[in-house]
Image (cartoon, rainbow, N blue to C red):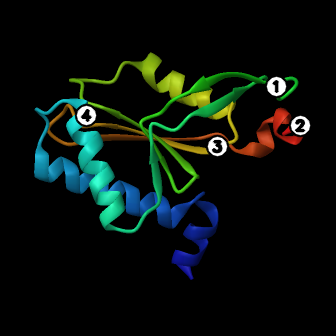
């Protein structure tokens, strides 16, 4: 019963759990001294190995909050199962503006969940952000 309640309250719970588990696995196996592109390729390998659909470097439309018109294109590192935007970093720390940028992309796209995973520290830093479509008036224009 408790698991059922959690699953109903967490957006894309099962997929999120699998993704975070893989990110932790990458952190444990590869440490924190590689370039971002190494972590990108390893994450892609693990997603494929685990049968989780993904697109590397997808093109995501950024929409006007008023009209829904496509204004620009955003290219995150990975899009997991057409549901979760993923940004990967390999920095000693993630500056707040990087996290704010991720939030803004959620706010102006049709996606509701995003993760920023920083592999640049001894233990991966994983930040989850949510911005649900019911808070986006432009979605009705799409």
Q: List the residue tagged with mark 4.
A: 37
> Mark 1 vs mark 4: which is more N-terminal?
4
C-alpha gap between disc 4 and disc 3: 24 Å
The image position of residue 54, as x and y in percent, is 46, 53
Query: In terms of secondary structure, where does tag 4 sit?
Result: helix
Residue 111: mark in rendering: 3
Residue 141: mark in rendering: 2
> Are discs 4 and 3 less than 8 Å apart at CB?
no
Residue 99 falls left or right of residue 92 = right
Q: Residue at x 35, y 58 (%)?
A: 47
> Mark 4 vs mark 2: which is more N-terminal?
4
Residue 69 falls left or right of residue 108 = right
C-alpha gap between disc 2 and disc 3: 15 Å
> Are discs 1 and 3 less than 8 Å apart at CB?
no
The image position of residue 9, as x and y in percent, is 62, 62
Tell me the mark number nearer the camera, choosing from 1 and 3. Answer: 1
Q: List the residue tagged with mark 1.
A: 69
Q: Is residue 117 above or below residue 48?
A: above
């Amino acid at each position: 019963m408790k698991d059922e309640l959690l699953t109903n309250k967490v957006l894309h719970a099962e997929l999120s759990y699998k993704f975070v588990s893989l990110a932790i696995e990458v952190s444990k196996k590869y440490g924190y001294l590689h370039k971002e592109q190494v972590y990108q390729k390893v994450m892609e390998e693990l997603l494929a190995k685990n049968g989780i659909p993904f697109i590397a470097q997808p093109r995501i439309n950024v929409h006007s909050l008023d009209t829904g018109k496509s204004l620009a294109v955003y290219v995150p590192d990975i899009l997991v199962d057409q549901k979760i935007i993923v940004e990967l970093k390999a920095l000693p720390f993630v500056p707040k503006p990087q996290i704010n940028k991720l939030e803004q992309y959620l706010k102006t796209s049709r996606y509701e969940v995003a993760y920023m995973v920083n592999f640049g520290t001894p233990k991966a830093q994983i930040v989850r952000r949510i911005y649900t479509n019911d808070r986006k008036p432009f979605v009705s224009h799409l």
